[in-house]
Image (cartoon, rainbow, N blue to C red):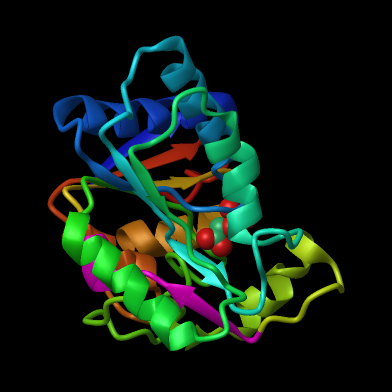
Amino acid sequence: MEIIVSKDYEEMSRKAAELAADSIRENPESLVSFPAGDTPLGMFHAFTDMVNAGTVDISKARYVSLDEWIGLSHQDKGSCGLFLDENLIGRLKKPFAETHIIDGAAADMENERQLLDRFIETHGPLEVSVLGIGMNGHLGFNEDGVDFELSAHIIPLSETTKQVMTKYFGDQFHPEFGLSQGISQIMAAKKVILIANGPHKAEIIGRAVKGEITNKVPASVLQSHPNCYVVVDQAAAAKL
Ligand code: PGA
């Protein structure tokens, strides 16, 4: 793991966007995956600014969703799909060659899961996977206790995630399950960039980076990834 401690959120965001852009420059036909959530907002804006300024060409690259709350469509506030529409896809002057965004409101979620697997199988492995980290160490919706061998799967949300999720959509929705890329797909990525900011992430970043590798802290698996960057601000680096 290469740990990069940035002075603040903006620097963390720029650094993560640069690392992702480098992957696309090296392989213009990259398959890339970025997360939704509060953490990546600045990175999305830094990345889309770079694309719009012409410093990275995504016209041959593909984008695939990391995860989605089951029951939420792209129109629903707090959905990963809406976040991606507003902060990535909708900000780009020139689009990716192709995007695969999970539909959390699909009538047949097993089919949706298979579509995610198939897209990654067809166009993957991921060139770059950018990830946030949950308060329980989850990556996407790979919650504590997850099987590291899984590919895309539907998984019950942990109690921690259910508590945290009210920040995304208040009391409006109460999802019980998520659809997520699996750890095996994340670990197959040629580059992984884990981003985190703020003092509330210090404890879990410390456990993920320096603790035992265990599915009780799913992000700890990244210690065994051959090309993983952990890009954090100073507050999130407090326990490193
Ligand atoms: P956050 O979520 O970026 O909103 O903190 C991270 C996550 O749960 O993966």
Quarter occupied by residue 81: bottom right
> With respect to residue 51, does 112 lie above or below?
below
7 sits to left or right of 59? right
Residue located 27% across and 82% down the image: 150
Quarter occupied by residue 91: top right
x, y percent for residue 194: 38, 49
Q: How many marks?
A: 0
Is residue 182 among the parts visible in the rendering? no
x, y percent for residue 153: 38, 82
Residue located 39% across and 87% down the image: 145
Residue located 30% across and 86% down the image: 147
146 sits to left or right of 79? left
x, y percent for residue 240: 40, 48
x, y percent for residue 94: 45, 25
Residue 32 or residue 191, whichever sits in front: 32
Q: Quadrant of ligand 1?
A: bottom right
Residue 156 or residue 203, whichever sits in front: 156
Residue 34 or residue 112, whichever sits in front: 112
Quarter occupied by residue 146: bottom left
Residue located 48% across and 31% down the image: 12
Bounds of the magenta segment: 176-187
Indicate yes or no whether the magenta region holds residue 50.
no
Residue 112 or residue 216, whichever sits in front: 112
Indicate yes or no whether the magenta region holds residue 186.
yes
Is residue 85 among the parts visible in the rendering? yes
> With respect to residue 70, does 35 lie above or below?
above
40 sits to left or right of 188? right
